[in-house]
Amino acid sequence: MAKKGIKSVVQKMSGEIIDTRKASRLAQNERRKAQRRLARELEKSGVKTDWKHAYEESLKHDSLSSKAKGLQSKIESLTSSGEGYNVQIESVAESIKTFTFFEYGKETLSKKGSAVDIQRRNEMFQHQINQSTKKNGLSILEKKETHAFYAATQWIWDSTNANERRNEAIMNEFGLTSLEQVYKLIVNKELDFKEFGFEDKEVFEEWLNYVRTNIDLDELRKIYKEEMEADENDEASDDNSSPSGGEAIKNIRMRTSNRFKRRHG
């Protein structure tokens, strides 16, 4: 019989059913992680606070970055209402871990994270992509850019269904095994070799030339850049809150589908 005050099961972690006591402990750990990262985000805006008071301090400011808002939202979701948690703690923990990895280069702030293989990195980046399209999601990526990325590659994945197959089709067309690299090739305003993990610029240029044998990268980037810049200059432009919304998204989809034809099955 469960002890007084301990409800039987509120969460599942890696397939294991856990009671509220364990869930509370796990949620507290993740809240602390989120607060430490929130303190860092606030510091970037000139707001100095320790991690213990980061959440309360964030409530005093209206102009928060999307990253700070995402962290704020995760902290709130990890606060029990008395009836347990309205989110899966494991899913929130994954969001915090992937955000930390791509924002700081490691999965934890306290010590060096373990090496990540390409499959795991792709999974983590996919998680960041998904978070970027959610309201107050925790991601290093911008929602508008993510929608534009998929609009620019729709001619590749249009016949696929699941997200995983869609991303595999995109990587295959580029001849690459890294979803993150493909995303940066389209979205980044400048192609800085260091951003792609290269130490030598000439080697990076050779790699770019290889990519160009699979796809007209320069034309694809040109279309993306022209439409996104035109959208930024249009004061009445839509916020692109949905994948199908916004003139930039529509124009990118239309122009790339007319210009490109899938080469690799």
Image (tube, rainbow, N blue to C red):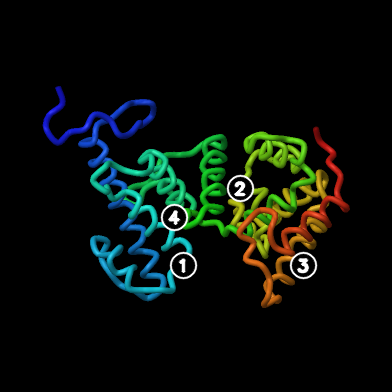
**Residue 215 against residue 190 in the figure, above or below:** above
Indicate which disc, 2 or 4, sits on the residue closer to the N terminus.
4
What residue sits right under mark 1 in the picture?
Answer: 65
Q: Residues within 10 Å of mark 4 (few under 14, many from 20)?
A: few
Q: Nearer the viewer, mark 3 or mark 2?
A: 3
| Image quadrant assignment for residue 187 | bottom right
The disc, 3 or 1, on the residue closer to the chain's N-terminal end is 1
Q: Amino acid type of disc 1?
A: Ser
Residue 30, image x, y percentages:
31, 47
Is 158 or 236 nearer to us in this picture? 236
Crowd rating for badge 2 (residues with CA inside 10 Å; few <14, some 14–19, many 20+): some
Q: Is residue 92 left or right of residue 159?
A: left
Category of crowding for the residue at label 1, using alpha-carbon neighbours closer than 10 angstroms: few (below 14), some (14–19), many (at least 20): few
**Element type where label 1 sits in the image:** loop
Q: Which residue is mark 3?
A: 226
SS at circle 3: helix
Query: Label 1 to label 2, Cα distance in Å?
Result: 22 Å
- Reading the image, the residue beneath label 4 is 104
Instruction: Name the kind of residue labelled 2 in the image.
Output: Glu
Image quadrant where one finds the C terminus: top right
Eye-nearest disc, 4 or 1: 1
Residue on which disc 2 sits:
180
Q: Quadrant of the N terminus?
A: top left
The percent position of residue 82, horizontal first and vertical second, equals: 23, 46
Q: Looking at the picture, how far across and down is residue 105, in whole percent?
A: 46, 51
Real-space CA distance between mark 4 and mark 3, rounded to the nearest whole angstrom: 31 Å
Question: Please, what secondary structure does the residue beneath circle 2 have?
Answer: helix
Q: Give the Cα separation between the discs numbered 3 and 2.
A: 22 Å
Please give the name of the residue rendered at 37% of the width and 68% of the height, measured from the top-left corner.
Answer: 42
Q: Is residue 112 left or right of residue 137?
A: left
Question: Is residue 110 or residue 168 the one in the foreground?
Answer: 168
**Between marks 4 and 1, how big is the CA–CA gap?**
17 Å
